[in-house]
Image (spheres, coloured by chain):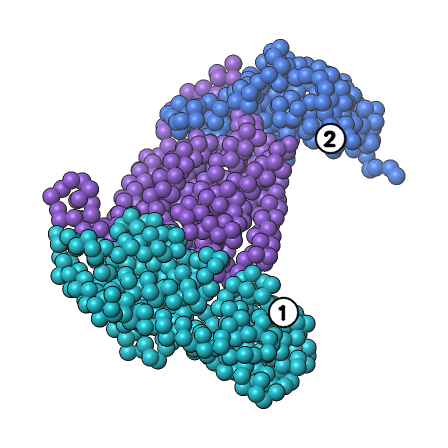
Chain colours: A purple, B cyan, C blue
Amino acid sequence: MAESALLDPVALEAPPPRRRGRNALVVTVSLVVLVVSLVVAVRIGVGATWAEIGRAAGARLGLPVVPLPRLLDSLIWNLRLPRVLLAALVGAALAVCGAALQSVTRNSLADPYLLGVSSGASTGAVVVVVLGFAGSQLGVTGGALAGALAAFGLLMLLLRRTGLDSMRIVLTGVVVGQLFAALTSLILLSSGDADSIRALTHWLLGSLASARWTSVVVCAVVLAAGLLVVWLCSSALDGFAFGADTASSLGIDVRTTRAVLLVTTSVLTAVAVAAVGAVGFVGLIVPHGVRFLVGPLHRRLLPLSAVVGAVFLVWTDALTRVVFAPLEVPVGVFTALLGVPLFLLVLRRRGEL
Amino acid sequence: MSHPARLGLALVAAALAAGCAAPGGAQAPSAQTVAVDSCGKRLTFAGTPQRAVALDQNSTETMLALGLQDRMVGTANLKTKVAPEYAAAYAKVPVLSPKVLTSEPLRAANPDVVVSSFREHFTPDRAGTRDELESLGVPTFVSAVNCPDGTTPPFERLFRDYENLGKIFGATDRADRLAAEQRAAVKEVEATKREPVEVVWIYSVFKGVPYVAGRDGMPSQMSKIAGAVNVFDDLGQEWPEASWEEIARRDPDVIVIGDLSERGNPGDKASEKLAMMREHPVVSQLTALRENKVIELPGIEMDPSVRTVNALRSFGAGLDKIAGRG
Amino acid sequence: MRIQVEHLSWGVPGKTIVNGVDLVVGDGETVGLIGPNGSGKSSLLRCIAGLRTPTGGVVRYDGADIASWSAREKARQLAFVEQTADTDSDLRVSEVVMLGRTAHRSRWRGPDAADHEVVAAALDRLGLTALADRPWKQLSGGERQRTHLARALAQRTSALLLDEPTNHLDVRHQLELMELASSTPQTVVVALHDLALAARYCDRLVLMHGGTVVADGPAADVLTAPLLRAVFDVEAEIGRDSLGHLAVGYREPVR
């Protein structure tokens, strides 16, 4: 019955092809940029010429090349390559989480650390360092992951009987974050010495120096799963734009979807932060920049944010390897230094500043 | 075995290792395999290492004191100037990083052994873990000072480092001589009878907060050797943070102040610290300060290194001077 | 689609806002909800839309309890337009209208040609075709309201629930919108403040006061001077304008 009224015999055409063509171009260009960035970034830094990279890769592909000396081979294969890949994975994860949380909380300043997960990760890392297990391969990473999941558990516990409305999520996240930040300070003050604090400074600001294949594999699996889940919530994320009631009337199970997104983004953030520390600004600025390019629809916004976040962090990390070489600056310092002007630029172009 | 014979063997080993450095020539005689325990790991060396990297100042100076600068392909993380007697040797060693060395430049330097004073260097985000380097065929030597076993005193652990490094690098002669010299110096300070005075060791003052010697560092040990008592022996750290009020409450007989003027931060000079204390309403009332029972020592020598014995000597001499005057 | 509201109550802790409402809306009927601020119109509408879980009573669509439906099923059966639903997002008009297709497609795929057709038809119906590519921020209040209505139409539901949809509209657009609401074969429940507009376009009016229905029937039976005095606390005169439409005039409030 409703159908008949709306089926006016008006000749209707699909939307202008201009925009679709532009999207296809944006996707192609960004994927090419991603692949090129990954390859070039492996070259950037100490001791890895193209010839050496070629020999390291060739030896693994079974090509008849002269193998590299063991340490140089391990520098390229076990340090540089996982580092570049981890930068890409973490950048992608943070950007996707930022985009999703900005929609869930209807707050354009939301970023992956809004939920207090990173503060939990810091607490876990500090505990591990203070207890003296930092030397083991999984020490800080494991502690950070445990701490992040503890913070996330507390967050969900505090939110469990609520409707998960935007403001409550933000406020609860802030509360959880503050609690864990206080715990971190308490532990550092009571039992940390100058050395353990120094050992953590890099990690707290975010550093990819500890990237290894283990964290790459973990992050890749979690990111693939997380990205798929978030992407399947694309239309819900679009629908959240007008608030809970409108979203609900569009057929979105608001509470369940929010819960799924909170769990997914928290786990993604926890794994990312555990791997490299709390790298700031990627999750905040990348989604804004990408919205500026392709609009706010999450079907396009999420995958493209992932790609742009990956490229952004790969290059920022490459910078940290060369700008003050042989010293390494924590990558979080550079993301902030680059992020602030980029953020201002985006806001200005959007006429919000 | 006499010393010249050992030296001869070491030279043969070095020559063999150098000659066999080209690929395919790794058949060093099994008699030359050296095995050393270092901080929980057993390190084995088929030949004498030729490409050592030292990760910090103390391990670098120990290597230089053993005359091993030609076997080094890198050093890093210098806190202050190298002691003048090692400056010429130090100039021959490439500085891989002025601060903490990370795993990429370390591996790019292609070392065959890594020497360090602290286990803390071996984390994934710094030099890489000891297991990783071991699996790549690079043994990691960590100073025994960093691994207390509960029985061996710190100075003795320091001397064991010399001996172990001597074995690894085929420089036993020089290592044994250095250890013997320093053992003698410790004995000498220990032999002098002194009143059991109470001492506070002030290493640095950061943002107005003094860092003092706790139970776990060399100063506590030096106090014992010289017959004195470190007043903060109840704090189980190397350089715990204290308050001026607490220092005043413990009312030490003698104050030792670390001079870090080579580090060059404001307040690093011993004189600056002293001036600050004299202006402090509580601390300035300390008997030790009013009677000028103050010993200034280079801060770098208060940490475990090949130079610590110098601090011990100066500390003993300082106590004697104060006692003589009192 | 026939909507039955049986003994419906809803409230927040300490306050009952909708109190035992019974209401039947016949298939294709257009019913106007009127009443002063705080009378419970919006809350009743939200309960009918399944956005609030009633503390008592049921809402049935063609006999089926709405509580048994998933969010998706609800969105295929009824569309709801809020009084004010704003956003910071840079969505374009056509993209907002496309949100109406959310419940009609799988999570795995984007909009297809059929979805674009429905959206284009809805845009055309509300006269928004020329504004299809315009960002939300550049729209006037009226254009935003019409965009939401187009979105609701794009949901292709049998029922349409509108909460004061004419608020931001100029006269012409008010008339067009109400014309649409009354002419569509959908079952429509619309909360309105403008009594004359309600009288002109609704088949029936439901007057609410203090969370209960105080009158339910044709406009002429509901809009009477005594009822308006009792409910709105105004002295009104009901008459006809020169075109023959029911008109309401008010005297100065007496204190």
The residue located at (62%, 23%) in the rendering is C50
The residue type indicated by label 2 comes to Val
- Residue A171 in the image: state x and y as whole percent: 62, 44
The residue located at (28%, 61%) in the rendering is B168
The residue type indicated by label 1 comes to Ser
Q: Front-most of B266 and B221?
A: B221
> On the image, numbered disc 1 is attached to which residue?
B243
Residue A275 in view of the camera: no
- Residue B123 in the image: state x and y as whole percent: 39, 53
Label 1: few (<14), some (14–19) or many (≥20) C-alpha neighbours in 10 Å = few
Are tags 2 and 1 found on a single chain?
no
Per the image, label 2 sits on a secondary structure element best described as strand
Q: Front-most of B71 and A195?
A: B71
- Residue B48 in the image: state x and y as whole percent: 22, 60
In this view, which residue lies farthest toward the right? Answer: C255
Describe residue A266's horizontal placement relative to residue C222 as left or right: left
Label 2: few (<14), some (14–19) or many (≥20) C-alpha neighbours in 10 Å = few
The chain letter under disc 2 is C
Residue A57 in view of the camera: yes
Q: Front-most of A303 and B92?
A: B92
Describe residue A287's horizontal placement relative to residue C3 as left or right: left
> On the image, numbered disc 2 is attached to which residue?
C12
Per the image, label 1 sits on a secondary structure element best described as loop
The chain letter under disc 1 is B
Q: Cβ–Cβ below 8 Å for labels 2 and 1?
A: no
> Would you identify the image quadrant in which residue C18 lies?
top right
Q: CA distance from mark 2 to mark 1?
A: 57 Å
The residue located at (27%, 70%) in the rendering is B173
